[in-house]
Amino acid sequence: MKISKKATELNPDSELASPGLYVALASLDENVAAVEEMKRFLKNHPAKLYKDTLEELLDGWSKGFMTNYKDDITSLAKSNGFKI
């Protein structure tokens, strides 16, 4: 995770480093930090990988997972062209 974090600091626009950091944080159950990293990147950059992740999160949310991130997930999905 330290490498991904450093990579996003060195190149905050990297579509490889940011999802890598997201996956590392999520795998460590650092869900708040993972969602914050996704929000940071998607604020200024479209990313296909994150759009795939958003689809998975929307599906998981509809099944009762990560419900405390509903507002973040739906907001990110809407701002990236998803119809909710």
Image (cartoon, rainbow, N blue to C red):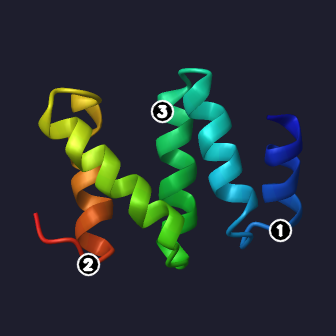
Q: Amino acid at mark 1?
A: Asn
Residue 5 in sight in this render: yes
Which structural element holds mark 2?
Answer: loop
Cα distance between the residues tagged 3 and 1: 22 Å
Which structural element holds mark 1?
Answer: loop
Which image quadrant: the N terminus?
A: top right
- Residue 15 location in percent, x, y? 67, 69
Image disc number at residue 32: 3
Q: Please give the count of numbered marks on the rendered protein.
A: 3
- Closer to the eye: label 2 or 1: 2
Horizontal side, residue 25 vs residue 49: left or right? right
Q: Amino acid at mark 2?
A: Gly
Image disc number at residue 80: none
Residue 27's place in the image compared with 74, above or below, is above
Q: Residue at x 29, y 73 (%)?
A: 79
- Which residue is labeled 2 in the image? 81
Which structural element holds mark 3?
Answer: helix
The mark nearer the N terminus, 2 or 3, is 3
- Residue 19 location in percent, x, y? 63, 54
Q: Amino acid at mark 3?
A: Val
- Residue 84 location in percent, x, y? 10, 63
- Which residue is labeled 1 in the image? 11
Cα distance between the residues tagged 2 and 1: 25 Å
